[in-house]
Image: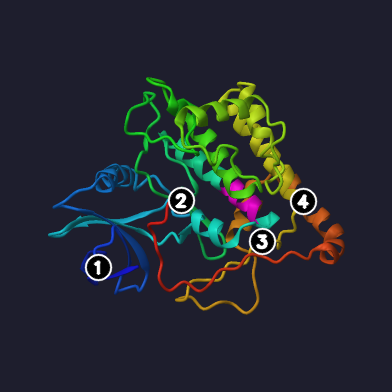
Amino acid sequence: MSEAVFTEKSATPVAFIDKKINALVKDLATQKRYVAKMQSRKKPRQQDLDLNTERVFLYENICKFRKEGYISQLADVGFDDDFRYLIVEDFGKDLTHYYSNYRPFDAPTTFLITYYSFQALKELHSWGYLHLDLRPSSFAVKQSFVLKLIDFYHVTPSKPKPKNSKTFRCDRFSPRVMYKKDQEFDEWADIEAWLFTMIFLTCENTLPWRNDRDADKILDAKEKFFKSQDGFSWCGSVGILPLVPFLMESKPSLTDFIEKLNELFSIEVLTYDEMEQPMWMLDGSVEQEKRPREPESSQNLSENMPSERKSERRLRSTERKSERKKKKSSVRPSMEVISDRNCNSSN
């Protein structure tokens, strides 16, 4: 990963070791680390043009996004002789990295990824935007378990509804509507891509069309999948995931669908102890605690649950504590201390 130095007054990079599109940088005044996303001013590539969309999106909404939310925060924008750049919070490594190094995930990890990625997507939609390019590399996780939605290269306002165009690439994560000419996109397109992403990350058999390269064959396989999942193994996923295609095909309103999923999430979370969370090794610049504590993500999850759900969860957790300790033999995922970070991984 490239390193940059900053002036003490701002997050303006004054030197780069190399010319990678992303660089891990540090504010000399606070020692806080950020990610610099750069675009060449002399020889722009498609990735550089995509960055313009992300810059406008993050800059125009900088006052809306909450620091404790699920969308990566913009710290600064600027330019020098060679680059335009965005300075965003250090959001950690994306889910492609974890998939490659720690899969299969254990049950708590799978639940957290599924739950918080859906919450991140809901937050984006609540601000009136569609992502339109969801995939494992669209989500990043750092430290204990802080998940962020990143890479807004194709983000667009949800109203008026955008139409299909040649700028959208179709692959194994793309919703079916992207294969159809002049079709309008809405929140359902992102939800379908989220479903494909979760299947890829958590199901043992991953996506049925993973080896297809022909767009027509992929679309046909996706259509058949939504009609029937006979013969497909959901092993490894959270319990609610097999219900998602069924709920989508029943054509509910978006509000009813979200309420139903939230209800199912609040029920499934009761099957986990509050301390049963993945243990991520902290960044090398942060001293790791000797005794693990409950991650912030678990606290946020409890805060979002109804009070009666919290009480029931604590009661059931206490009743099953000794039994779960006897049965549990799986190894929790862990991460190496990060020294060099490749922020360009994608899927």
- Callout 2: few (<14), some (14-19), or many (20+) C-alpha neighbours within 10 Å? many
SS of the residue under disc 1: loop
Q: Residue 260: x, y in percent?
A: 66, 32
Dot 2 or dot 3: first in sequence order is 2
Spatial CA span between label 1 and label 4: 48 Å
- Let me know if residue 256 appears in the view: no
Asked whether residue 266 is drawn in magenta, I would say no
In depth, the one of 273 and 190 nearer the eye is: 190
Residue 18 has which mark? 1
Q: Is residue 112 above or below residue 128?
A: below
Magenta-highlighted residues: 109-116
Residue 81's label in the rendered image is: none
Residue 27 vs residue 318: left or right? left
Residue 82 visible? The answer is yes
* Residue 162 horizontal side relative to residue 252, left or right: left
Q: Indicate the position of residue 225 as horizontal and vertical percent values.
A: 62, 30
- Of the residues shown, which amino acid type is indicated by label 2? Ser
Q: Earlier in the sequence, mark 2 or mark 1?
A: 1
Q: Which residue is mark 3?
A: 277
**What SS does tag 4 mark?**
helix
Task: Name the residue beneath numbered marker 2.
Answer: 137
Magenta portion: prevailing SS class: helix
